[in-house]
Image: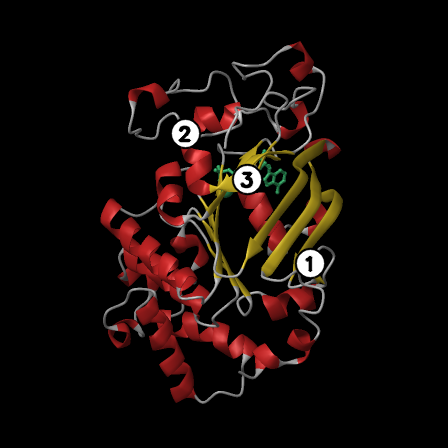
């Protein structure tokens, strides 16, 4: 494929760790608040994603899930950034500080994003066929109209349209919410990207459409087509799709590990509190159902452990010491001075 094997691709790959398509190391981001206030929204994040893997990202509203996604995609406006440190590598290529030109070769082509609300992301003046096709033209202007239409229909069919041709000339407002979400998915799939980041893609859908969309996303990962970062506050949904789970709290990655293991035996008290609402198989696994207190705003985080003021297990030292991320089990890490013992 022309654009995918072009100059940019040739420069990729040499430094990438085997299998890891994305490597995030010590990523910190401080945004500029009103009146110049410092807003540390991501703090010392370390994460990786391998090919054919689905990484779920969970955390309360405001914990930094979307900011993380937008940082990876180069979508955080430069003017709002006060300070940025660390590294985000896509197949060995540093994305922090990459030029807009560099990002425009990647976005839509190698990395794609599915947003929460399709009505705000789709252009109301363009047909679905034009919008899905636009992504192709942006990266491969040499294709014939017939080839583009073929690719558009194939992507729409993978996104769950049973008769794609019938919707090519439809405008977004003529489609149901579920169809619009599928059109967004088709736009993200059309260039066969290496990574798809789906930010709460199912929240606007009813239960049966959620299941269908999750199936489509999961198939793409399992068929080896792409890696997936799936952002959701719904741990039930994450459990059904993610291989690994990263739990964010106030910009910190507080726990990370195999999704099933983290959900069944959380090591961090925050993950334990989050998972409390999930249906459990046994009574002894039940945990308190709500987390007292509120997520702190980025400029008012407590000293010591960021979760210490809400943590039922907090001791004096927790209010004084910022815990380092440490190994708490096989392929599992948590940022807690007193994590639960896990296998
Ligand atoms: N452009 C911005 N300027 C300043 N602060 C911002 C900006 N965008 C987000 N924030 C702040 O960054 C923090 C993380 O926000 P983010 O949108 O990433 O949360 P989230 O985990 O995606 O929440 P939700 O579940 O509600 O989508 C919040 O405190 C938010 O207010
Ligand atoms: Mg968000």
**Category of crowding for the residue at label 3, using alpha-carbon neighbours closer than 10 angstroms: few (below 14), some (14–19), many (at least 20):** few
Whether residue 162 is visible here, answered yes or no, is yes
Q: Is residue 243 left or right of residue 160?
A: right
Mark nearer the N terminus (1 vs 2): 1
Q: Residues within 10 Å of mark 2 (few under 14, many from 20)?
A: many
- Which residue lies at the image location 29% right of the left edge and 25% below the top edge? 282
Choose the circle earlier in sequence order: 3 or 2: 2
Disc 3 target residue: 330
Name above or below for residue 119 compared with residue 188: above
Q: Are marks 1 and 3 in contact (CB under 8 Å)?
A: no
Q: Secondary structure at mark 2?
A: helix
Q: Which residue is at the front of the view, 140 or 239? A: 239
**Gap in Å between the C-alphas at discs 1 and 2?**
33 Å
Q: Which mark is residue 95?
A: 1
- Residue 227 position, x and y percent, is 49, 59
66 or 249, nearer to the observer: 249
Which one is in front in this view, the residue at disc 1 or the one at disc 3? 3
Going from N to C along the chain, the mark reached first, 1 or 3, is: 1
Residue 263, compared with residue 113, is above or below; it is above
Q: What is the CA distance from the residue labelled 1 to the residue labelled 3?
A: 29 Å
Helix, strand, or loop for circle 3? Answer: loop
């Amino acid at each position: 494929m022309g654009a995918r094997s072009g100059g940019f691709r040739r420069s990729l790959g040499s430094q990438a760790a085997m299998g890891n398509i994305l490597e995030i190391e010590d990523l910190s981001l401080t945004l500029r608040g009103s009146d110049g206030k410092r807003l540390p929204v991501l703090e010392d994040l370390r994460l990786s994603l391998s090919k054919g893997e689905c990484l779920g990202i969970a955390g309360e509203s405001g914990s930094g899930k979307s900011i993380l996604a937008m940082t990876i995609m180069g979508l955080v406006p430069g003017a709002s950034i006060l300070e940025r440190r660390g590294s985000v590598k896509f197949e060995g290529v540093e994305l922090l500080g990459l030029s807009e030109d560099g990002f425009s070769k990647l976005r839509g082509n190698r990395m794609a994003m599915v947003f929460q609300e399709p009505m705000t992301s789709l252009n109301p003046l363009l047909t679905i066929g034009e919008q899905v096709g636009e992504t192709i033209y942006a990266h491969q202007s040499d294709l014939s109209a017939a080839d583009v239409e073929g690719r558009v229909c194939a992507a729409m069919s993978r996104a769950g349209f049973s008769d794609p041709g019938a919707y090519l000339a439809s405008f977004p407002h003529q489609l149901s919410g579920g169809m619009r979400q599928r059109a967004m998915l088709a736009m993200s799939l059309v260039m066969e990207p290496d990574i798809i980041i789906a930010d709460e893609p199912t929240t606007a859908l009813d239960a049966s459409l959620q299941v269908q969309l999750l199936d489509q996303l999961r198939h793409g990962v399992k068929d080896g087509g792409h890696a997936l970062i799936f952002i959701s506050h719904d741990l039930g949904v994450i459990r059904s799709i993610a291989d690994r789970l990263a739990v964010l709290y106030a910009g910190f990655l507080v726990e990370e590990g195999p999704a099933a293991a983290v959900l069944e035996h959380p090591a961090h008290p925050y993950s334990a509190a989050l998972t409390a609402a999930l249906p459990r198989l046994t009574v002894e696994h039940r945990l308190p159902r709500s987390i007292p207190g509120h997520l702190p705003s980025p400029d008012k985080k407590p000293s010591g452990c960021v979760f210490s003021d809400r943590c039922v297990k907090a001791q004096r030292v927790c209010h004084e010491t910022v815990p380092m991320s440490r190994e708490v089990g096989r392929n599992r890490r948590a940022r807690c001075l007193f994590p639960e013992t896990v296998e």
